Image (tube, helix red, strand yellow):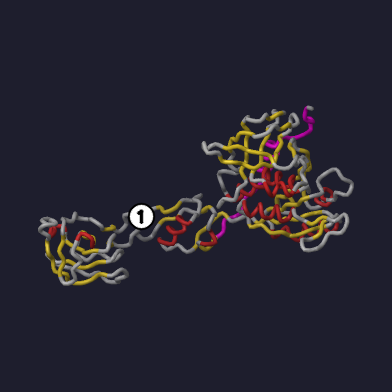
Amino acid sequence: MAADARLRTVDEQLEIVLAGLGSIDPIELTLLDAQGLLLAENVSTEVPLPGFDNSAMDGYAVRAVDTRDATPEHPVVLPVVGDVAAGATSRSGMGPGLTMRIMTGAPIPAGADGVIPLEDTDRGVAKVAIRRPVQSGECVRRAGEDLPAGAPALGAGAALGPQQLALLAAIGRDRVIVRPRPRVLVISTGSELIDVGHKPSFGEVTDSNSYLVTAAARDAGADARRIGIVPDDHSKLLDALESQLLRADVLVTTGGVSMGAFDIVKQALSELGTVEFTRIAMQPGKPQGFGHLGDRVPIFCLPGNPVSALVSFEAFVRPAIRKLLGKRNLQRATVQAVALERVDSPAGIRQYRRGVLHREATGGYSVSLVGGAGSHLIASMASSNCLVVIDEEVTEVVAGSRVTVIPLLLANR
């Protein structure tokens, strides 16, 4: 069966979504609060790294020329005239033919130009036997060899991971300007919904969508919060949305976007902004809404079935969050996997099926499906670790053929 000509493709809808996003003003955060975000300024160092010549080893500071004749059989013996500890705040000095014990990280004494490690000596206290020659500069960390004063440290757009935060701390920056996490607020709509912790009566359904979407938004990098449930009541939905507009960079609702007589999301949103409701050539997730409320706050109106909500989030909301974060890669990386079973798919529709991705001993991947095509099957969704994508032009996937798979594993698994 050919796809309805009125259906918009997934790619077309995503293009509309991304074009409809503005930007979020950069903010200043402390280093640890900035972890995982992108730098929004160019940072240079005002101090050299290292800040002074220091020892790379525990050993003895020497003049290289004084050790040139040292051999294991005939070591050079030098008097030890002092100790230099890490953290010394004044620079010591020593004359020709002398040495000083030195710790890793301690300042190199004036007059010395190298360090002989402990293991190449007899570890003497009053005097020390040195068993090999030392090269000038050996085991010495030069001031500014990592970064000279005034040099660029990190550029705008740099991702701030542990290594980058360490560099910022080392050059004395305790706060930086970054692209902030978008504030994503999630609302589940439907008079049939009840909160977790309440036993459902006949006809009632425990809300899972708001937990699903909020967690997915956090996984994408957003500062996401669950607002809760709003019944199928026009005024209550308006009140809930209006009360959150000033707190949100993105709003997400689930439910109320189909053709049902009691779906009030469409009517309510028309009073607060401009939201387009359309049908997308995808399964699940055909009914979609996207637009803006108030002062250009993007809103996504996702279907109410959990699997539809997840697939819709992955297709449209996650890339939007990534764009607001300033990320270059907006969508998850895909892999090619061998299908372990046959699958049918309607012509002209991009189908997303839940699956379990397996890593084979050969290094490749295979994938098996879990659950049926139904968009209400939460248990099979929970047992899956990927989405199998069957493109619009494919109507049959035979066992043993290759398919595109979107892994949904947590980053630290």
Q: Nearer the viewer, residue 107 or 360?
A: 360
Examine the structure image and report whether residue 64 is included in the region drawn in magenta: no
Residue 215 seen by the camera: yes
Q: Residue at x 71, y 33 (%)?
A: 343
Q: Position of residue 128 (x, y in %)?
A: 16, 66
Magenta stretch, residue numbers: 2-27
Q: Is residue 91 left or right of residue 227?
A: left
The residue carrying pointer 1 sits among few (fewer than 14), some (14 to 19) or many (20 or more) residues within 10 Å by Cα, namely some
Q: Nearer the viewer, residue 374 or 25?
A: 374
Nearer to the camera, 56 or 292:
56
Q: Residue furthest front?
A: 361
Q: Residue at x 41, y 54 (%)?
A: 153
Q: Position of residue 27 (x, y in %)?
A: 56, 59
Secondary element at image label 1: loop
Pick whichever, 96 or 132, lies toward us: 132
Can residue 291 be seen in this snapshot? no
Image quadrant where one finds the N terminus: top right
Q: Position of residue 282 (x, y in %)?
A: 73, 37
Q: How many marks?
A: 1
Q: Where is 309 relative to 26, above or below?
A: above
Q: Quadrant of residue 72?
A: bottom left
138 left or right of 13 in image: left
The image shows residue 371 at horizontal and vertical percentages of 73, 42
Q: Which residue is mark 1?
A: 147
Amino acid type shown at disc 1: Leu
Residue shown at 87%/45% (left/top)?
260
Instruction: Kindly identify the residue that appears in the image at 74 percent across and 60 percent down.
Output: 227
